[in-house]
Image (cartoon, rainbow, N blue to C red):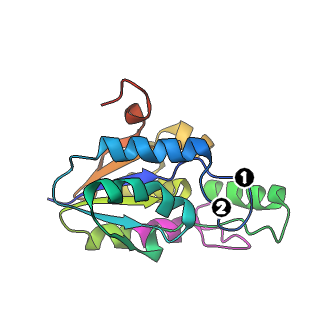
């Protein structure tokens, strides 16, 4: 059985390029580390973007493991500041509405979902992977169709620090956030 826990990166700084985490984002990363601190026999993976690497770093430290980077975990598009944020967000929304639309920068929702699916198909054992909300939703849409994805995720995206669990290419838990509260498991 292959189990992949996809961790949405923590809250990020609202700047273009490759922003890191906010103070809240670092707290979310620590909560993720506590949640998975006793996970035996896992491998850790991350998108190469800073916010994802910072999200999985506390867990890597707790478990004494290295983090492997994989481009297939990166976001579908990343705002670099070369055009107004409003234009970027409009293109993002169009990609969400039309899975085949290719934005000015990045790739279509369908292509991003297939790229992430390629990562899942190669995964073995138990994996914890820090990724991004857009591409995780793209993956879910690829695996179960739009009707299988909670409408709120399509509208608002993945909550920071949320965990989505995929067992043998089947989602078994989507956007879990209980570990982020004081009483979470």
State which region is magenta. Answer: 98-116
Say which quarter of the image contains residue 61.
bottom left
| 80 on left or right of 61 | right
Percent x, y of residue 18: 65, 67
- Seen from this angle, which residue lies furthest top? 183
- Residue at 48% across, 63% down: 53
Examine the structure image and report whether residue 16 is included in the region drawn in magenta.
no
Query: Is residue 83 positioned above or below 63 on the image?
Result: below
Q: CB under 8 Å between callouts 2 and 1?
A: yes
Query: Is residue 31 positioned above or below 39 on the image?
Result: above
Say which quarter of the image contains residue 16.
bottom right
Q: Which residue is mark 1?
A: 14
Examine the structure image and report whether residue 102 is included in the region drawn in magenta.
yes
Indicate which disc residue 142 carries: none
Neighbourhood count class around disc 1 (C-alpha, 10 Å): few under 14, some 14–19, many 20 upward: few
Q: Can residue 140 be seen?
A: no
């Amino acid at each position: 059985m292959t189990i992949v826990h996809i961790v949405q990166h923590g809250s990020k700084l609202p700047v273009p390029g490759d922003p890191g985490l906010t103070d809240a984002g670092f707290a979310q990363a620590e909560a993720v580390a506590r949640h998975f601190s006793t996970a035996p026999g896992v491998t850790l993976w991350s998108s190469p973007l800073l916010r994802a690497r910072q999200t999985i770093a506390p867990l890597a430290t707790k478990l004494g493991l290295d983090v492997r980077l994989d481009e297939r975990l990166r976001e579908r598009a990343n705002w670099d500041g070369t055009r107004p944020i409003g234009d970027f967000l409009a293109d993002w929304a169009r990609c969400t509405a039309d899975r085949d639309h290719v934005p000015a920068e990045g790739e279509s929702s369908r292509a991003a979902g297939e790229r992430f699916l390629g990562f899942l198909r190669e995964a073995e054992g138990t994996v914890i992977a820090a990724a991004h909300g857009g591409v995780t939703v793209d993956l879910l849409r690829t695996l179960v169709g739009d009707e299988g994805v909670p409408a709120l995720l399509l509208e608002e995206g993945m909550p920071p620090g949320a965990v989505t669990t995929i067992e043998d290419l089947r989602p078994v838990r989507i956007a879990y956030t209980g570990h982020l509260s004081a009483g979470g498991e």
